[in-house]
Image (cartoon, rainbow, N blue to C red):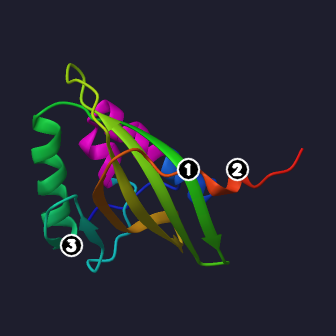
Amino acid sequence: MAAKKQLNGSADDVEAAFYDALSRADLDGMMALWAEDEEIVCIHPGAGRLIGHAAIRSSWEGIFERGSVQIRPLQLHATHNMLTAVHSIVEEFQRPGESSQDVHIIATNVYVKTPHGWRITMHHASVASGKAPLDMFKASILH
């Protein structure tokens, strides 16, 4: 695998780049964000577990062939330490031209710090029906 360019910044920056690549159906941009380790894992909603670059790239290629996907990450809950970051997110999604539905995605993104910067090591997303849950962090803030 060719060397990946250094992404300066945090796991949050890689996550923003991930959702940006999704919105533009940018396969190369998406795959540049993944760790070089062949043990990387991706689980799309309603699908099986994919392990390794070839399987993950092929799955995103199939998704992007149907067009871009507009996903708005909401309700980030993050845990970080020096070498890993785990983000639990509620995602609102819509494909351009499709009507809005009362469906949201619960996603977990795991990042590792590598010599080339922060990289994705796992993305696991599951569809949840109904309205997105109330953001309990915002609801509990007193002004």
- Report how far apart the C-alphas of labels 2 and 3 lie in the structure: 39 Å
Instruction: Give the residue displayed 86% in from the left and 50% down from the top.
Output: 142
Residue 28 in the magenta stretch? The answer is: yes
State the image coordinates of residue 74 (x, y, percent, origin top left): 52, 46
Q: Quick one: label 2 or label 3, which is nearer the N terminus? A: 3
Identified by mark 1, the residue type is Leu
Q: Which residue is mark 2?
A: 139
Residue 101 quadrant: top left
Residue occupying the far front of the picture: 130
Disc 1 crowd, CA 10 A, few/some/many (<14, 14-19, 20+): few
Rendered view: 34 above or below 80: above
Label 3: element kind = loop
Residue 118 vs residue 68, the one in the foreground:
68
Q: Nearer the viewer, mark 2 or mark 3?
A: 2
**Residues tagged 1 and 2 counted as in contact (Cβ below 8 A):** yes
Q: Quick one: label 1 or label 2, which is nearer the N terminus? A: 1
State the image coordinates of residue 111 (x, y, percent, origin top left): 49, 68
Identified by mark 3, the residue type is Gly
Give the extent of the magenta segment. Answer: 17-31
Rendered view: 99 above or below 72: above
Rendered view: 45 above or below 16: below
Q: Which residue is mark 3?
A: 52
Label 1: element kind = loop
